[in-house]
Image: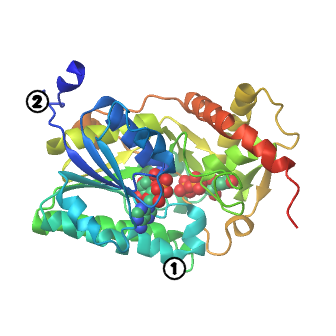
Amino acid sequence: AAGASARVDLDGNPIKPLTICMIGAGGFIGSHLCEKLMNETQHKILALDVYNDKIKHLLEPDNLPWNGRITFHRLNIKHDSRLEGLIKMSDLTINLAAICTPADYNTRPLDTIYSNFIDALPVVKYCSENNKRLIHFSTCEVYGKTIGSFLPKDSPLRQDPAYYVLKEDESPCIFGSIEKQRWSYACAKQLIERLIYAEGAENGLEFTIVRPFNWIGPRMDFIPGVDGPSEGVPRVLACFSNNLLRGEPLKLVDGGQSQRTFVYIKDAIEAVTLMIENPARANGHIFNVGNPNNEVTVRQLAEMMIKVYSKVSGAQPPETPTIDVSSKEFYGEGYDDSDKRIPDMTIINRQLGWNPKTSLWDLLESTLTYQHRTYAEAIKKVIAKPVAS
Ligand code: NAD
Ligand code: UDP
């Protein structure tokens, strides 16, 4: 299309079509990134994952407008000799592959560490050796707890942003003790960040590291018992969606006092597209990507989701809207939590001029509309089915 060829980068230069090796393309973030790159750009994607359910609509039928620009390669990067070849064929590699649900961090710490550190090593190595650019997905969790969380509860300093706003180039990474296995994920992500940074410093690897702050939206995780294991514990959006769809109370872990900032996946994906298309502005940087204006406690998130779901489904809120559960009961031994996560936006603002747009209410309204449309009927069937003996 004429419009597509006229696209320019932030410095006014025309954007050349790239071939992108996207690892973990079949996941939540990958599916949205593939969708945007197919709809709005001329880039090609080699989509690597063990699953492709979330990008099926982009792969079939074969008369889609972007026909041929996206190809799926079903492979596990743990053990597949095709990986290096696919990286070599590409201009840029984006690595999204990871175990990244908190329920796994303390119950499957070995898989978590292997997935987030060991399995990412060959990707970094092949990029470095073949002089290929790498965009690696880390996490806001590398910051761990805020400095402020160690102050007395009534300390006025807790109100001072210096004690809680998380800055890429200044904030320390503060994790709990080793038996708090929750931190196995953050620690593995921190070490792979340091390794990538060192490859940049010593061997000239062109890299960008992304630290997502609770990106949420349609297709995130799974609904237990419908498109995932009935005993599985996804991230909070899918947990609360599942409770709402089933008319059950939402479970607040340790009282739901932890604070999070949520950003709409579609806003966040715009930031990633800017990184892809503005290498000179993105290389060598670590970027927070989140929405500092959308801060709530988990309890407030639950309350808002209950209201929004009533609005979009027309159903009455459950009689007991929320219940408290202990983290030990919900996640098991070794769970711990990040207290508060507000991203500093200075660097991404300066380098890429990016700002999030969507309010928490609006993003929940579109996301819960999607959840209701996608799952409400399936849930009714699951509930109606007699339990197999
Ligand atoms: P996701 O689980 O939906 O996607 C990850 C994808 O990687 C999955 O499709 C999975 O099948 C694939 N994968 C995992 N191991 C693989 C392997 N060995 N070989 C091939 N494919 C493999 O998660 P997401 O939310 O899309 O997250 C993507 C990345 O962003 C992860 O690195 C995660 O740590 C990071 N992140 C996301 C958020 C968020 O808010 N969603 C927050 C912090 C960090
Ligand atoms: N949480 C909760 N109830 C649930 C699921 C999660 O209270 O059913 C809490 C969890 O303890 C954490 C927050 O919600 O404080 C966000 O959890 P999530 O799994 O989304 O990931 P995190 O932000 O901790 O990486």
Q: Is residue 34 visible?
A: yes
Q: Is residue 11 above or below residue 141?
A: above
Which amino acid, mark 1? Ile
Depth check: give the residue in front, 88 or 30. Answer: 88
Mark 1 secondary-structure assignment: loop
Indicate which label's residue lies in the foreground, 2 or 1.
2
Q: Which mark is residue 13?
A: 2
Location of mark 1 (residue): 178
The colouring scheme, among rainbow, by chain, secondary structure or one colour, is rainbow
In the image, ligand 2 is in what quadrant?
bottom right
Considering the image in quadrants, where does the N terminus appear? top left
Residue that extends furthest to the front in the rendered view of this protein: 62
Residue that extends furthest to the top in the rendered view of this protein: 2
Q: Is mark 1 within 8 Å of ligand 2?
A: no
Depth check: give the residue in front, 11 or 166. Answer: 11
Which amino acid, mark 2? Asn
Depth check: give the residue in front, 200 or 348. Answer: 200
Q: Name the spot of residue 66 as percent of width and height, x first.
A: 32, 34
- Give the residue at x 39% y 51%: 25
Q: Is residue 141 visible?
A: no
Mark 2 secondary-structure assignment: loop
